[in-house]
Image (cartoon, rainbow, N blue to C red):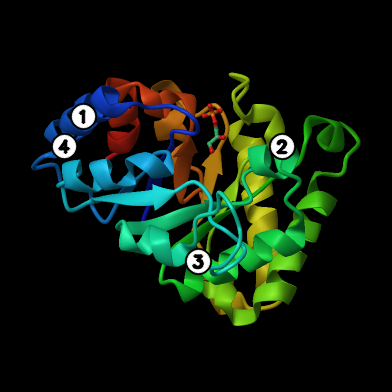
Amino acid sequence: MRSKIIIANWKLNGNWSFNEEFASALSKGLKEIDLKDRQIVICPPNVYLQQMNGLLLEKSIFLGGQDLSDELSGAFTGETSGAMLKDFGCRYVLVGHSERRERHFETLDVIVKKAVNAISAGITPVVCVGETSEQRQNGMMKEVLSEQIQSLVTGMGDQIDAVVLAYEPVWAIGTGETATLEQAQEAHQWLRSEIEKVNPAIAQKLPIIYGGSVKAGNAAELLQVADIDGLLVGGASLVPHEFLSICLAGL
Ligand code: 13P
């Protein structure tokens, strides 16, 4: 059985006092709970990594970055490398989130470079894939996912073994419209079968998590879906009691 991963993506949110309150509520809420191998990951903005590293003391809570550079070092103003994230205690990093694909024009090649850099730095890349609403309406969901997976498989080879995949249908992000359990399972199963074609052993153990309007009210049922191995949570991860119930959902 694959263990579950619950990731909070704070995006451009949080501040010093909110972070303190959040960390204290989460640590209190998870204290002495048997999470059964479940990992909880908080991805705050980079400037708060050090603060959060000092606050998240429960051993099941890990830190993650929201992005990393596709370069290792040098004249790249504003960038953060995988090694730097590692220095600040990150165990995970999001790669290729649709907000970065859209706003920062991240291509599949750049996403592969970032994922490889994360692995070289000893950090697990959480690579985001997913189709837009238009692509789904045009019946292209599987084709789009296959192209994204193909690029990862070609660019990373067996290193894909060290990746967490996140299926985030773009139409479900921040819209309140969650994928139905059937839609989510269909996409997750498709992603797994695409990897199976290249490496069945990796496909079986690769965690594929779901993101897109996850809330306390739908977390438990999503986590019961066969090929869903965790959740990537945006808006609801900013409300401490709501995120806590997502962390505990279905336990
Ligand atoms: P929401 O949970 O706000 O829909 O955001 C999902 C997301 O983008 C997580 O990375």
> Which residue is identified by label 1?
20
Q: Quadrant of the C terminus?
A: top left
Q: Quadrant of residue 165?
A: bottom right
Asked if the residue at label 1 sits under 8 Å from ligand 1, the reply is no
The location of residue 94, given as percent across then percent down, is: 52, 51
Mark closer to the observer (3, 4): 3
Q: Nearer the viewer, residue 240 or 6?
A: 240
Q: Secondary structure at mark 2?
A: helix
Of the two numbered discs 1 and 3 on the same chain, state the one appearing first in sequence: 1
The residue closer to the viewer here, 14 or 223, is: 14
Identify the mark nearer the N-term, 3 or 4.
Answer: 4
Separation (CA) of disc 2 from disc 3: 21 Å
Of helix, strand and loop, which one carries label 1?
helix
Cα separation, mark 2 vs mark 4, equals 34 Å
Q: Identify the residue position indicated by label 2 in the image.
A: 103
Q: Which mark is residue 118?
A: 3
Q: CA distance from mark 2 to mark 1?
A: 30 Å
| Residue count near mark 3 (Cα–Cα under 10 Å), binned few <14, some 14–19, many ≥20 | many
The amino acid at mark 2 is Arg
Amino acid, disc 4? Ser
Q: Position of residue 48 (x, y in %)?
A: 33, 40
